[in-house]
Amino acid sequence: MPTERAILIPFLKWPGGKRWFVQYYSGLLPGRFNRYIEPFLGGASVYFHLKPAAALLTDSNVDLVATYEAVKTNWSRLQEKLTEHHKNHSDRYYYRVRGMRTQSLVSKASRMIYLNRTCFNGIYRTNKKGQFNVPRGDRDDVVKETDDFEAISKLLAGADIRHADFETSIDEARRGDLIFADPPYTVRHNLNGFVRYNETLFSWADQERLAVALSRARRRGAKIVCTNANHSSIRELYADGGFTLRPIRRFSPISATSSSRKQFSELVILANT
């Protein structure tokens, strides 16, 4: 079951993040559940909103997983490193840090948060070699007033954080657990350029594998909330009668110009209970 704690603000801006979902559609999330499972962690907006006592948090991004692990295990040192980045921040310093290969957990985490907060538009994008290649943006605030790494660390104490494939974590769900799945929107990638944000793509075969894994979890009695592209091919994947499909709308801020930002229709997939 979720616990009652103070409001926690996500510390990462993530493409496809669900802050808007929490703000406008939190009523679609169940009020009671056992363990919380999130196989595409990203910015963790839903996790920070629900604040579950027990959670399994996984992602395929090694650096992202390391960042959450560092917040969990050594938040105070991480905060010190971010303060150092803040003091040293400049155009030259940004590109020097961007080209670094860090070793320690805290160094990896502080580098990711620093780049996330000062890069162009908060975009996470790597080349085929997995090297972060987003240019510097116009924001210089590395340390934010909303940061509460101590409180986040206390929440993460109840979480199992892993670098893992989504199917592995979904297969751990049991009756009464809640799965919140927010995969890359494969269909939409062809329309808005999201294909450039990662060195590996989330293929249509992955979409099919996700649907099958969620169907298995539903039959085991897990509660499921999945967000995805509102496209006929996605709707067909979940049209077996075991899910309720609800279209919703959101505003997309990931665009180079304000004039090209617009409303998108998305799909919420809910397991029938």
Image (cartoon, rainbow, N blue to C red):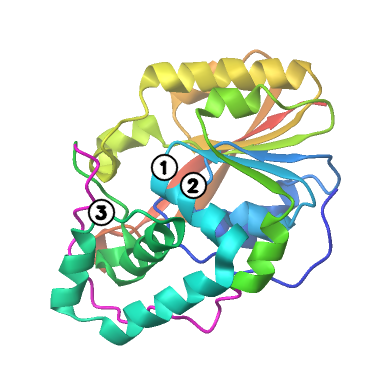
Q: CA separation, marks 1 and 3?
A: 13 Å
Residue lying farthest to the left in this orientation = 92
Question: Disc 1 vs disc 3: which is toward the camera?
Answer: 3
**Of residues 177 and 110, the one drawn nearer to the viewer in this rendering:** 110
Q: Residue at x 19, y 38 (%)?
A: 129
**Of residues 265 and 222, the one drawn nearer to the viewer in this rendering:** 222
Residue 209: image location, x then y, percent: 50, 17
Per the image, label 2 sits on a secondary structure element best described as helix
Report if residue 130 lies within the magenta region.
yes
Mark closer to the chain start, 2 or 3: 2
Q: Residue at x 56, y 20 (%)?
A: 211
Disc number placed over residue 62 in the picture, else none: 1
- Residue under label 3: 101
Q: Are marks 2 and 3 in contact (CB under 8 Å)?
A: no
Q: Residue at x 50, y 41 (%)?
A: 266
Residue 71: image location, x then y, percent: 56, 62
Magenta span of residues: 129-148
Using the rendered image of the protein, determine whether residue 236 is visible from the camera's viewpoint.
no
- Residue under label 2: 65
Mark closer to the chain start, 1 or 3: 1
Q: Is residue 19 depicted above or below 34 in this figure?
A: below
Residue 77: image location, x then y, percent: 51, 72
Q: Residue at x 32, y 86 (%)?
A: 87
Say few, some or many: other residues with alpha carbon within 10 Å of mark 2 (under 14 / 14 to 19 / 20 or more): many
Amino acid type, mark 2: Val
Say few, some or many: other residues with alpha carbon within 10 Å of mark 3 (under 14 / 14 to 19 / 20 or more): few
Q: Are marks 2 and 1 in contact (CB under 8 Å)?
A: yes
Amino acid type, mark 1: Val
Classify residue 137 as left or right of residue 52.
left
Say few, some or many: other residues with alpha carbon within 10 Å of mark 1 (under 14 / 14 to 19 / 20 or more): few
Q: CA separation, marks 2 and 3?
A: 16 Å
